[in-house]
Image (cartoon, rainbow, N blue to C red):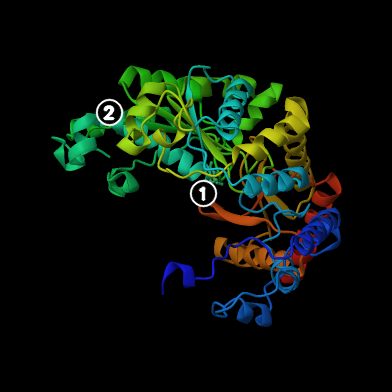
Amino acid sequence: MSSDEIKEEGLDPEDWEALRLLGHRMVDDMVAYLRTLRERPVWRSVPTETRERLRAGLPEEGEDPERIYNEFVNHILPYPTGNLHPRFWGWVKGTGTPFAMLAEMLAAGMNCNVQGFDDSASLVEEQVISWFKSMLEYPREASGLLVSGCSMANLVGLAVARRQHAGADAQRAGLSSLARPMTLELLGLGSDALRLIETDDRFRIDLNALARAIARDRASGCQPFCVVGNAGSVNTGAIDDLAALADLAEREGLWLHVDGAFGAWAFLCDEYRAALKYMARADSLAFDLHKWMSLPYEIGCTLVRDDAAHHTAFDFAADYLKAVPRGAAAGGVRFSEYGLQLSRGFRALKAWMSLKEHGRRKLARQVAQNIAQARYLASLIAAAPELELLAPVAMNVVCFRYAQPGASEAESARINREVLFRLQEEGTAVCSSTMIRDRFALRVAAINHRSRRADYDALVAAVLRLGRALV
Ligand SMILES: Cc1ncc(COP(=O)(O)O)c(C=O)c1O
């Protein structure tokens, strides 16, 4: 077929007015949905009809946008995991906000590929990263990168650590080029090289055990290069002794990476500043915005004290991407040279709009509110003889169980697992579970800006009701 026989077409709508009306309906519907979250069950399982529809094959011809939207309303919107609901406390899943939802629409509308060219989106990313540094009092000259979440933020930090300690040879020839193999799976280090260090009675890294592990590894010819500390661990919210970890890393010549996925933000509360101010000594710091900062998924960040070290680890720019002095490709920070992604979405916009909407103080109050709620829940547990707290409440995570006197660990695990499932299946609340020193625990992570004290009262009442029915 010759080019003049091809009927040219694009993907924009033929009827712009119909799209505009549909878009308005979508905004109205989503705002109504967010306003009425509390009226629905926290979670319900996806029904068979919906499951089947969501397995159908790809249509050969396009469908009417309004029909597609109706299918979304009937089959997708009603069956989320539930993390927007006021009584959702499972894992560490963030809640999001309505304004940030709208920011996502604007970002998708602009559809920027944020690489650090001469464009507003790159400046917005630079600006929000500088705000994060100032909020967490991390050195101003540090580099930073927005990523999909804290898993990726950790990977970036550890990749810089590996590059710094393994040197250029390993970057070029792989880790097998090293005289002695170092130590992590994705980085080509092997999971055998990961040393899990014992914790103390407050679930913080045992520093003596860490020092012993380093000495043992060195004696056996291994080459430790990085210590990872937690500014709020997933299981219990424990904060490691970051000052001591920084001292030890300095003394041993090791990179210090701190995982502050949610806990880093407790720094905004006066009470936690003393424990968390040493995050500023970390060589790299990883944290999320889609958890305690309530931004919609996905957004996390890595900060690296030594900008040059960060850049060296990821500077693979091809000729066609090199910085130029003028034109569209001239710009500031070349984000694509600081991480694994070349094409990068405009995540920064929702952060920019949300931080401006709330300001630092309100976000700080929000974090403090969740911590106070976790303590409130702990006080309800302490006051109920049938409930048992399984770990100290260091921050916003509460691990507990329904405790039947005289029950074996296995029996207790069976009862509490059933309590967990029934809580979720009734749609009353979603918490998750974990093991605390080999004991099955119900786990509540309070990062939800929609929860109120009454929601925690309802949780305790439901656990007692279900526990009693089961024993
Ligand atoms: C302490 C900690 N680190 C890392 C992660 C992983 O973060 P993400 O789920 O954003 O990849 C989590 C997730 O809950 C976490 O709590």
- Name the mark on residue 405: none
Mark 2 closeness class: few <14, some 14–19, many ≥20 residues within 10 Å: some
**Amino acid at the residue labelled 2:** His
Q: In the rendered view of the protein, which quadrant contains the C terminus?
A: bottom right
Asked if residue 467 can be seen in this view, the reply is yes
Q: Nearer the viewer, mark 2 or mark 1?
A: 2
The percent coordinates of residue 47 (x first, y second) are: 69, 78
Q: Are marks 2 and 1 in contact (CB under 8 Å)?
A: no
Counting every numbered tag in the picture gives 2
Type of amino acid at the residue the image marks with label 1: Arg
From what the image shows, is residue 315 above or below residue 196? Answer: above
Is 246 on the left or on the right of 414, as rendered?
Answer: left
Looking at the picture, does residue 185 appear above or below residue 462? above
Q: Residue 94, can we see it? A: no
Q: Secondary structure at mark 2?
A: helix
The answer for how far apart the CA atoms under marks 2 and 1 are is 34 Å
- Disc marking residue 437: 1
In which quadrant of the rendered image does the N terminus lie?
Answer: bottom left
Q: Residue furthest front?
A: 4
Q: Nearer the viewer, residue 57 or 113?
A: 113
* Coordinates of residue 442 in the picture (x, y in percent): 64, 55
Residue 273 x, y percent position in the rendering? 63, 21
Residue closer to the observer: 257 or 76: 76
Say which label, 2 or 1, has the lower sequence index. Answer: 2
Task: Give how far across and how far down residue 225 sits, in percent.
Answer: 30, 30
- Compared to residue 118, the image places residue 21 above or below, namely below
| SS label for mark 1 | loop
Q: Give the residue drawn at x 62%, y 49%.
A: 297
Q: Residues within 10 Å of mark 1 (few under 14, many from 20)?
A: few
> Which of 238/86 is in front?
86
Q: Which mark is residue 165?
A: 2
